[in-house]
Amino acid sequence: MRSEEAIKKKAGLGALVMTARTYYILCMSFLMIPVLIFCAGYLRPYIGIPMALVFIALLVFAVRGPGYKSSALKEFIKLPWSYVIVCIVLALLLSFVTGIGEFVYSLEDHVYRRAMLRDLISYDWPVIYDMSTQTNPVVAAFFAGHASKSALTYYFTYFLPAALIGKIGGMTAGCVALLIWNSIGIFLIFLGMTVFAKRPSFAGPFILVFFAGLDAIPNAINAVCHYDWWLWMEGYVPYLCYVANFTELCDVFHQIIPCFIIVLLLMTQPDTRSEGLTASLLFAYSPWATIGILPLAIGAFFRKEGGAGKGITAVRNIFTPVNILAAGSMLLLFGSFYMSNSGSISFQGIAWTFYDDPLQYIPAYLIFIAVEVLPYFLILRGRYGRDPVFAAACLTLLLLPVYVVSEMNDFNMRGSMPALFVIQLLLTSVVAEKAHKNEIPKKTGDRIKTVLAALALILMMFPALLNMFVIFGNEIKGSPNNVEAIGSYGNIVDESYLGHITNNFMAEGYEDSFFYKYLARQ
């Protein structure tokens, strides 16, 4: 068996050698660092330190597992340094353009992200608000009838490295750190897409930026003849919504980047004995995406590339000590933390019950699936029809629209992220291969398929291009940004954000919750 050192020596100095093991270590370190900071900063020392050591031990055991001692080194990829440097620049540029750190005009959700980062920097951990300090009279009157204290309770794990640096260097240092941290995450995604495609190709960065459903079609129809269902660019039917990558990278970067990295690990990880550790880490970053990744994790166990084995061996590899202990620890830690605030899930139910006429749900569902899922299913089914992860992704995307959680349906928007990324990952692999072979279809049927696939790739760019137009247009005009409209959750400037803040970020009565009573620092 060749060692990684021998592989790198054979590759020479002109390329970066990437093995599955190296990529796994890089990604798991990126994902684990914020979790370890949470353990050290938010938990009582006699709980946080042992739990952090458990996570470190699980990671070490996974890296040294049988899968990484054998199959992990059989395949590797050489990446030209020019390609690596361009990917680093693209990652920094994408983070900057999407508003990370708020150095350019930012989309709406950044007003919440900036306030949260500021509070993580300026308050002691756990972040507890004394609501009597509110200076806006309307806000103060609102909280007069509520508990005197509230706790910041949200999936903010991704922000903790930047917040830690901000505690040392101030808010600006924290914003710069967040920009760099986010860029590292995007770069890891670029690397992973290259590892999966088994060749360096800029199809990965392109599709990461522009992947979306064919939202251009319903938006064009609405522009010609307005229809009552249309609400916003990606909300063209009631309560059903899958969101474009660029929009998610702007608004919920703290959820989508860890999600994409974890999906990449599931698709490239050679040892299913530690797959539970990989998948369960997503719970620290996005509880809704964790629900969406479960079917994919099951499918990944039965991919030929996963080396899960057959029959009783496959089942045994699922229920390993690493998988069980990792999933149990994450559920206990972050499950109890999230449950201290359940206000954001008060609006929920079967999707068709929210329609004036439940029968209206049928055409809405069919239109939605035709725009968001069907085109990519038709493009990919020939090659990946037997892939269990592809099947799990398609099934997930068909079932998620049946249920609604929150008025904007976060269950759909965030729960779909893992499955949508599988679709774009497989699409990237196909595009990279076609570009590498540079073949011109000879049969009429193949030409038609190629034209339709190219048309789908063009139409999918609409949401990203429109958001870029908004960002660049407002930046060029010097339009005022609203990122300071909240300021701090402990002293809210604009009362119009009250409802969303109290439902999604604040936990009243937190003292009686399991997490704050038994686990959190006092």
Image (spheres, rainbow, N blue to C red):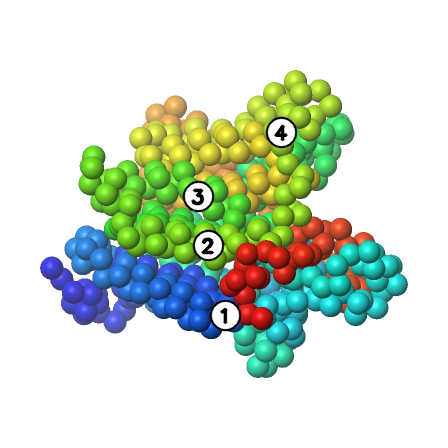
Pick whichever, 45 or 463, lies toward us: 45
Name which residue lies at 67% across and 57% down.
509
Sequence-first disc among 4 and 3: 3
Disc 4 and disc 3: Cα gap in Å? 21 Å
Tell me the kind of residue under disc 3: Ile
Q: Where, quadrant-wise, is the N terminus in this rendering?
A: bottom left
Q: Crowding near pointer 4: few (<14 within 10 Å), some, many (20+)? A: many
Q: Position of residue 86 (x, y in %)?
A: 43, 64
Instruction: Please tell me the numbered disc located at residue 380.
Output: none
Q: Which residue is mark 3?
A: 293
Q: Residue furthest bottom?
A: 169
Q: Position of residue 447 (x, y in %)?
A: 40, 29
Tell me the kind of residue under disc 1: Arg
Q: Which residue is mark 1?
A: 44
Q: Residue furthest top?
A: 359
Q: Which residue is mark 4?
A: 351
Tell me the kind of residue under disc 2: Leu
Q: Where, quadrant-wise, is the C terminus in this rendering?
A: bottom right
Disc 4 and disc 1: Cα gap in Å? 41 Å
Disc 3 and disc 2: Cα gap in Å? 19 Å
